[in-house]
């Protein structure tokens, strides 16, 4: 019997993943806020309203969160009764909550408890790649072996597969820092030449992710029987963790792609005549910008050099941006 999936959110990724699951023969329900708009954009799926979610049984489906980062906590709180009955929660949304400063998997634990099995999908791909059947490998990060096995096996195809990884802190933090790095790369490419400093920035982003993940893990170490064993495991498996698709693979893609909003934002603010506000208004949501502000002003995590750099660039005078970046890259 095919499993039931309930995708919560009908944005680009939510619809792309829903269609993919349907093509595999799975039973899929999709929910969103504005059903009229969602159904106009997608004729293959009858999208249902979030308003009826509390009337559904969360335990009869694998729930997949596909809302944007600003809406993640709002959905958890508004439909708390629903989520408290869920057995599994998979997320296509990664990063940090801008209201609490918590990583999303920590936010889920705080909102609905420790009983739910949680997993995160992350990797170097765009929604259109999945739609176009481009060969994709992503990371599936979870501490639950049964959930990992189920998701890997039930979503595998000739062009898509999930690589298991238990280090969810590292994959979540990589999803934050890669967007910050992409802004810096977009700015650097515009000012100093395409790709000239990209490898340096990605290396710094990888190192920063590792250090900040250690910091995040230390705050959550009560989850584990012996935190020393966890740190030994991380050190022994450092190369494997860093080279996973959702870690450095995602960084490489985002920092080299013109279609990334973060990269485009970096390009725009390389022009000293363009204000930060003007650039944001032109691009729309810029995750790297929002995450940088949240990390510095609201989170309890130790902040790395790339994050500090972007924060300084955001806050300084327009005319000082190039100098700040030059000093950091030692150009």
Image (spheres, grey):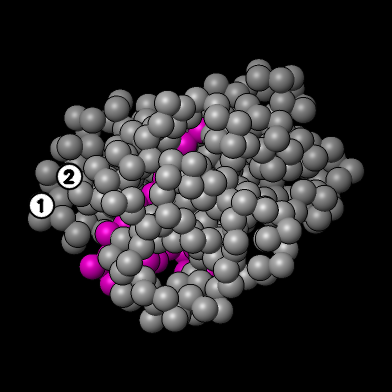
Residue 313 shows in this picture: yes
275 up-or-down from 24: above or below: below
Q: Is residue 137 left or right of residue 254?
A: left
Give 121 or 311, whichever is nearer the viewer.
121
Q: Residue at x 23, y 37 (%)?
A: 234
Residue 16 position in % (x across, y down): 57, 45
Q: Secondary structure at mark 2?
A: helix
Q: Residue at x 51, y 72 (%)?
A: 75
Where residue 245 sits, quadrant-wise, is top left
Q: Residue at x 20, y 47 (%)?
A: 145
How many neighbours does mark 1 have within 10 angstroms: few (below 14), some (14-19), or many (20 or more)? few
Instruction: Determine whether label 2 and label 1 are within 8 Å by CB.
Output: yes
Q: Quadrant of the C terminus?
A: top right
- Span of residues in magenta: 96-124
Residue 297 shows in this picture: no
Q: Which mark is residue 230?
A: 2
Q: Is residue 312 left or right of residue 60?
A: right
Residue under label 1: 226
Where residue 268 sits, quadrant-wise, is top right
58 up-or-down from 301: above or below: below
Residue 247 position in % (x across, y down): 42, 35
Give 275 or 16, whichever is nearer the viewer.
16
């Amino acid at each position: 019997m095919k499993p039931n999936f309930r995708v919560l959110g009908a944005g680009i990724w939510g619809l792309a993943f829903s269609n993919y699951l349907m093509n595999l023969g799975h039973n899929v329900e999709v929910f969103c806020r504005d059903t009229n708009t969602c159904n106009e954009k997608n004729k293959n799926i009858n999208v249902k309203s979030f308003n009826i979610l509390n009337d559904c049984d969360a335990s009869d489906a694998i729930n997949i969160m596909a809302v944007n980062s600003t809406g993640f906590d709002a959905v958890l709180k508004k439909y708390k009764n629903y989520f408290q009955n869920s057995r599994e929660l998979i997320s296509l949304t990664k990063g940090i909550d801008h209201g609490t400063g918590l990583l999303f998997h920590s936010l889920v634990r705080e909102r609905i408890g420790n009983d739910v099995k949680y997993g995160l999908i992350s990797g170097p791909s765009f929604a259109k790649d999945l739609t176009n059947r481009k060969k994709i490998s992503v990371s599936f990060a979870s501490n639950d072996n049964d959930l990992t096995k189920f998701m890997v096996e039930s979503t595998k195809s000739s062009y898509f597969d999930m690589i298991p990884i238990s280090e969810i802190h590292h994959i979540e933090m990589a999803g934050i820092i890669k967007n910050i790095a992409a802004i810096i790369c977009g700015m650097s490419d515009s000012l100093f030449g395409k790709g000239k400093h990209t490898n340096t920035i990605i290396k710094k982003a990888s190192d920063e992710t590792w250090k900040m993940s250690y910091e995040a893990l230390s705050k959550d170490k009560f989850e584990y029987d012996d935190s020393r064993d966890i740190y030994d495991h991380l050190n022994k498996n450092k190369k494997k963790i860093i080279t996973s698709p959702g870690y450095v693979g995602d960084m490489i893609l985002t920092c080299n792609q013109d279609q990334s909003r973060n990269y485009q934002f970096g390009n725009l603010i390389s022009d000293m005549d363009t204000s930060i506000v003007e650039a944001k208004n032109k691009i729309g949501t810029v995750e790297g910008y929002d995450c940088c502000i949240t990390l510095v002003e609201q989170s309890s995590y130790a902040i790395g050099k790339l994050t500090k750099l972007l924060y300084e660039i955001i806050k300084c005078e327009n005319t000082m941006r190039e100098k700040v970046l030059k000093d950091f890259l030692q150009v």
